[in-house]
Amino acid sequence: MKETEVRERAFSMPLTSPAYPPGPYRFRQREYLIITYRTDGEKLRALVPEPLEVNEPIVKFEFIRMPDSTGFGDYTESGQVIPVSFRGRRGSYTHCMFLNDDPPIAGGRELWGFPKKLAQPTLRAETDTLVGTLDYGPVRVATGTMGYKHKAADPAAVLASLAAPNFLLKIIPPCGRQSAHLRAGLILSRGHRTQRCMDRAWRPRSSRPRFGAGGRATGARGDLGHAHHCRPDPRSRQVVHDYLRRTTGEESCISTTRLPSSPAQRAA
């Protein structure tokens, strides 16, 4: 294979059988269960990287069915999202994600910096109850339940909460010895998790949903929704903080660097 062919074809690994195709990416018929619960504020602040700020001791645990995803297939994912603010603007920080499909794990990590790992999440209806689970090997990590479509929620309000800016910490590992990590990338990026079209949304009629993750969570509230959405190409994420170029000048931390989404755009 000639060098020109390598440059033209290279997008993701392996070269001749990439883990995922170039975008744009469409995610259709998505169904999710989001359970919001209160936690220890000090522990939460110890997990969220500066300059992000924790608004209140709240965590959103998401169970998501992704049955029709361009280039990625049919899979389920789950994880924790933490409401935060950046310079006064409210958004969310994705703390961790677990999926049962390799292509979206590779694509999510390499393209956008989503903190994805392999596990076994599920989201399904059991008679009159919606059940979300997360297993890591033989260990049950989390279980969430909610009455199935008991009460309609305001789709506009749910969509607005999901459309807020999302912050990701993307770590680009170094090649070589561990002490060379300062030559690697460590950036905080901002973007919208998705561009969505909300179909329907529900929440419990009276009783609160049940949720356990290493112990019973308190103050839990659940939301169930269906949505069609697309995830913008990588260039739509903007670097807002570069940890390896930080100086005393605040503005020097801000970059408008946008990542290329295809071999042709990279060549240009």
Image (spheres, rainbow, N blue to C red):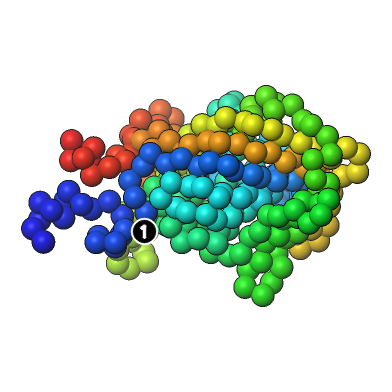
- Residue 21 is at least partly visible in this image: yes
Side of 137 where 114 appears, left or right: left
Q: Residue at x 8, y 58 (%)?
A: 2
Figure check: 122 above or below 265: below
Side of 96 where 183 appears, left or right: left
Mark 1 is on which residue type? Ala
- Residue 36 is at least partly visible in this image: no
Q: Residues within 10 Å of mark 1 (few under 14, many from 20)?
A: some
Element at label 1: loop
Q: Residue at x 23, y 44 (%)?
A: 263
Spot occupied by residue 96 in the image (x, y as percentages of width and height) = 58, 53
Residue at the disc numbered 1: 19
In this view, which residue lies farthest toward the right?
206
Q: Residue at x 10, y 56 (%)?
A: 3
Residues 186 and 260: in front is 260
In this view, which residue lies farthest toward the front?
127
The N terminus: image quadrant:
bottom left
Spot occupied by residue 143 in the image (x, y as percentages of width and height) = 75, 59
In this view, which residue lies farthest toward the bottom?
138
Q: Quadrant of residue 55?
A: top right
Residues 26 and 176: in front is 26
